[in-house]
Image: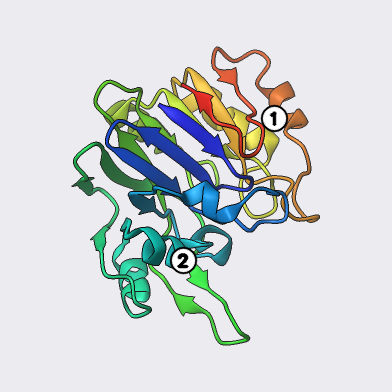
Amino acid sequence: MKLTWFGHSAFRVDIDGAAIMIDPFLENPTFEGDVRAAFRGATHVVLTHGHDDHLGSTLEICKATNALLIANWEICHHFAARGVERYSPGNHGGTIDAGAFAVSFVLAHHSSASIADGMPPIYLGNPCGIVLTMPGEKTLLHMGDTDIFSDMALINEIYEPKIGIVPIGDRFTMGAKLAAMACRRFYDFETVIPCHYATFPIIDQTPDMFIAEMRQAEAKVLVPERGKPVEL
């Protein structure tokens, strides 16, 4: 698998038969690359929840590439009303077979609504974490935006993810201490990738505190350079 981080919680996962954009907030303040190049060839967009810093470029990507949108029921129909033709809705506890991979929806403790153009918030269902199961690859969990919760242990037992994408920025998600506690106490990750930091001034600006909290953990902390693919 080839994984690319674009800042915030936006990732691209390339495997045989699929190019998956996760929470593609590509025009975030920390990414200085070419947005269209970042999603070129995308086959799927997978979303954890309906906040605008996670929906990001979803509409543009789906219209430009004909990528299949995979998200909860409300988000899929939100984008269908805006011209997205290919979508596959799911929700907590469900798994969607996407051919080259499968997506499972798991719990996340957060909120989920779109706020745009000064209009009232649009309810977009409950937030999720997403598990990607891919033949011949290690299972990946993107936690979405979340607090720590004890049922993370059940997610680990059911899906056995070895790669964890973990929000660490505090204020809106876990901060360094809670994120590291979640990884150490509830998961058996081999690789942990921090996200949801440095994008805005009101959240933590570096992963340094998280790295320090993880110093006794068995999992390796990987901090990719924005826009640069890494092999996992």
Q: Position of residue 61 (x, y in %)?
A: 43, 60
Task: Give me the disc on residue 89.
Answer: none
Q: Residues within 10 Å of mark 1 (few under 14, many from 20)?
A: many
Kindly tell me whether residue 146 is visible in this rendering.
Answer: no
Task: Give me the disc on residue 210.
Answer: 1
Q: Residue at x 68, y 16 (%)?
A: 215
Q: Name the residue nearer the viewer: 229 or 207.
A: 229
Residue 125 position (above or below residue 170): below
Side of 100 relative to 144 (left or right):
left
Side of 138 relative to 173 (left or right):
left
Residue type at mark 1?
Phe
Q: Position of residue 131 (x, y in %)?
A: 35, 39
Q: Quadrant of residue 76?
A: bottom left
Residue type at mark 2?
Glu
Task: Give me the disc on residue 60.
Answer: 2
Q: Residues within 10 Å of mark 2 (few under 14, many from 20)?
A: few
Q: Position of residue 99 (x, y in %)?
A: 19, 41
Q: Which tag, 1 or 2, sits closer to the chain's start?
A: 2
Q: Residue at x 38, y 53 (%)?
A: 45
Q: Quadrant of residue 120?
A: bottom right
